Image (cartoon, rainbow, N blue to C red):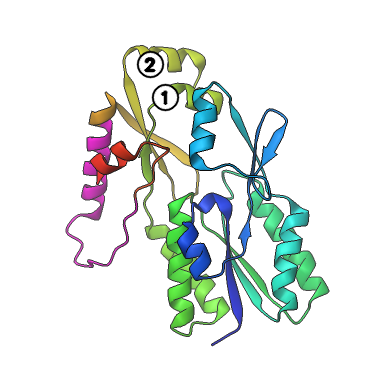
Amino acid sequence: MENYRITIDSNSDLPSFLAEKYQTVIIPQYYAFGDEVYGDEKNMTPAEFYQKMREGALPSSMANNPAVIRERFEGILKEGFDILHIAFSSALSGSYNNVCVAAQELMEEYPDRKIVVVDSLNVSLAETILFLKAHQLQEEGRSLSENAAFLEEYRKHINVQFTVDDLFHLKRGGRISGAVAAVGTALNLKPFLSITAEGTLASNGTVRGRKKSIRVLAERMRDTLGDNPDKTVPVGIVHGNCPEDANLAA
């Protein structure tokens, strides 16, 4: 088996038990509440994060740190391993470019080692699905280049759809205007969004009411799967501190 390690970004929502199982090196993505920066040595639990938001604090996101990327990657290279890194969508963050720059610099310093960065063109658990597929392929004996090429094709078949309860989060992120958020909230409208093939966000309509939005979301995903004879297609549900809604979708 070719000697390479598979790494990933922290915003992949990779569960801790999988990170431990594969002894995964994770590249942290940073966020801040005011002047307090989190994401690496200093972090918050999901419960703490969402509680802070309920109290009115607004987080802001930041790209990954080039120095930290170099440090994490160099540790792997010094152990004699190449690297296959699965990155957050390049269309939604500058983090992908930071990883590519660090990888190129390190390969010049370590000419006998390879670092391949795969743009997931996706977010959250979709990155984790690519991560698990990469490990499966590695265990089957695929080389680093074969694995990366497969992932770049496989990512085209990952479908991410979601709904948002609070329109003002979309307004704060610059996705909609304040007027649209106010009117939509008054009408109890819940939007549907998805990740496009280019790794960007797209709007896919609205319905009234949170429970209906969850039911319609589940129906859309069921329609997307269709009568697929492949019963091993992975399906994941991710929630933002609303397990009851996740259970309803399931």
In terms of secondary structure, where does tag 2 sit? helix
Residue under the image location 57 percent in, 43 percent down: 92
- Highlighted range, magenta: 213-236
Q: Residue 189 at x, y = what percent?
A: 32, 21
Q: Is residue 160 above or below residue 179?
A: below
Asked which quadrant contains residue 115, the reply is bottom right
Mark 1 → mark 2, Cα distance in angstroms: 8 Å
Can residue 175 be spotted in the picture? Answer: no
Q: Is residue 232 magenta?
A: yes
Q: Is residue 171 magenta?
A: no
Tag 2: amino acid? Thr
Q: Is residue 204 above or below residue 112?
A: above
Tag 1: amino acid? Asp
Tag shown at residue 244: none
Tag shown at residue 185: 2
Residue at mark 1 = 166
Do callouts 1 and 2 mark residues in contact (Cβ within 8 Å)?
A: yes
